[in-house]
Amino acid sequence: MAHRIRPSADWYRRKIFSMEDNDYLIGPALDPETEEQSLEDSANAVLAFGSLLRLERRNSRLTVAELARAIDVDEAEIRNIEHDPNYRARPRTILGIAKHFDLPPKEVMKLAGAAASNDDRFVEKAMLFAAHSDDLGGLTREEKQLLKAFVEYLRENK
């Protein structure tokens, strides 16, 4: 019995772009300017995801190790999410975090960069949240209010 090898997505992409007529593209045409803005928005949301996780964890008085055990992931993944804006968390981890902190999974997936968000207000709120969060010591009253307001926004966006 012969096994069929399925080409990778990259192979398909190269094949499509090698064709002279771009009418073969499926979906909306690629706009480099829009694509660049989308990548920037995604990076800002991921930064907010790291801030949200860090603040929720601190607010719950959990160490990185305790949270990692609770959602069954490696401690390094939690640290990467909290401190590396270029790190993309695995979907299983994102869903574990959403469930652990009782956050809407769909919104957390958008925040983590694992799902697209076409909502400019969502990106704006995420950027504002990330810009005002700080991770030194216990949560200040202002950080608690900021965290509460952002979590409420995520929940109402379900």
Image (spheres, rainbow, N blue to C red):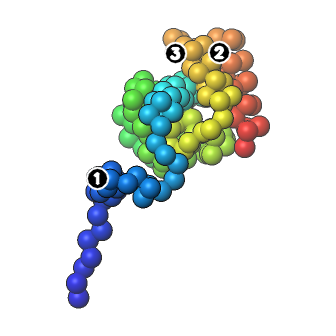
Q: Which disc number belongs to residue 140?
A: none
Q: Which quadrant would residue 12 be assigned to in this image?
A: bottom left
The spot of residue 74 in percent (x, y) is 38, 40
Q: Residue at x 72, y 18 (%)?
A: 145
Vertically, is 39 above or below 115?
A: above
Pick the residue in front: 129 or 29: 29
Q: Is residue 150 visible?
A: yes
Disc 3: which residue: 135
Q: Residue at x 46, y 42 (%)?
A: 30
Q: Furthest residue to the front?
A: 21
Q: Earlier in the sequence, mark 1 or mark 3?
A: 1
The spot of residue 40 in percent (x, y) is 48, 27
- Mark 3 surroundings within 10 Å by alpha-carbon count, few (fewer than 14), some (14 through 19), many (20 or more): few
Disc 1: which residue: 18
Amino acid, disc 1: Ser
As drawn, is 20 to the left or to the right of 88? left
As drawn, is 4 to the left or to the right of 24? left
The spot of residue 144 in percent (x, y) is 68, 18
SS of the residue at dot 1?
A: helix
Q: How many marks?
A: 3
Which of labels 2 and 1 is toward the front?
1
